Amino acid sequence: MAERLRLGVNIDHVATLRNARGGAMPDPVRAAAVVSAAGADSVTAHLREDRRHISDEDIRRIRASGGLPLNLEMAATDEMVEIAVRTRPAHVCIVPERREELTTEGGLDAVGGEADLAPRVARLADAGIQVALFLDPDAAQVEAARRIGAGAIELHTGEYCNATGAAAGAELARLERAARLAAELGLECHAGHGLTLDNVGPVARIPQVVELNIGHALVAEAVFDGLAAAIRAMRMAMDRARGTVA
């Protein structure tokens, strides 16, 4: 039987909903507990420079709750590195960030940013944190991640999710090639961005991918079916695609 695929659930948009009105509801820490009870493997939260959804206090409380491992998404800035070293999440995923974007628009330029990324990745790794770089499925970027010293990459699946017909097949092939290269280089391979119940199957079947990080689609489904039910449905879709249904 194939290796079971891990599921990380991004809870950013629980905080987005809270911040739309202010106050404390819905609580991302409660969401993290639901994520755990529903069978996910980790909680992902993106602490943005402008704090538009997840806050520093959210991160502190999630860590203090003693629940699932925290995957902290963050920009490669000195401020964020210091927060991560102080907070000690299990994992960090370094992502590109622009204040004017609605959501992350693509992968890091690890090739062009190698000199700036390498010391920050080393600082995080020295603190015992697994570091992933969020990358487009491009061989040069994957090779740069290895030189930089990251232990993992997360492949940006947004182009695949937005494509249709033959273009979707071409984007899937890019993901497959990048995942194979990552495994050959000794990098753990994750994937995420834009994945839904309708499109997750082909990505879940890529054997070198060991983890998917999914957020917006789950919170969107939770409006109608509840967060736990949305997570269980995604877990089942992933397991069926991977051939790991008990």
Image (tube, rainbow, N blue to C red):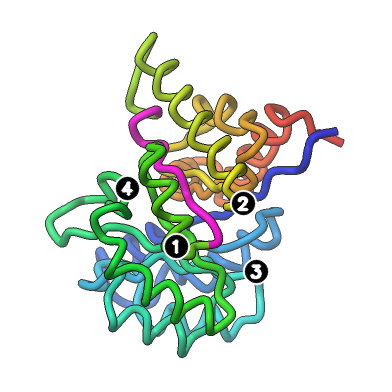
Mark closer to the chain start, 2 or 1:
1
Q: Amino acid at mark 3?
A: Leu
Whichever of labels 1 and 3 marks the residue nearer the N terminus, that label is 3
Q: Residue 186: which disc?
A: 2
How far across and down, in percent of the image, does residue 137 sit?
40, 37
Q: What residue is drawn where x is 17% and y is 52%? A: 101
Q: Residue at x 45, y 41 (%)?
A: 217
Q: CA distance from mark 2 to mark 4?
A: 20 Å
The quadrant in which the C terminus is found is: top right
Q: Nearer the viewer, residue 114 or 206?
A: 114
Give the residue at mark 4. Answer: 107
User: Circle 4: is it few (<14), some (14-19), or many (20+) Cα within 10 Å?
Assistant: many
Viewer-side residue, 50 vs 183: 183
Amino acid under disc 1? Cys
State which tag comes first along the sequence, 4 or 1. Answer: 1
Q: Residues within 10 Å of mark 2 (few under 14, many from 20)?
A: few
Q: Which mark is residue 239?
A: none
Q: Nearer the viewer, mark 2 or mark 1?
A: 2
Amino acid, disc 2: Gly
Tell me: residue 198, above or below residue 99.
above
Q: Which residue is mark 1?
A: 93
* Mark 4, secondary structure of its residue: loop
Q: Where is residue 223? Give x, y as percent.
A: 45, 46
Amino acid type at circle 4 is: Gly
How would you rate the neighbour count of disc 1 (Cα within 10 Å): few for under 14, some for 14-19, many for 20 or more? many
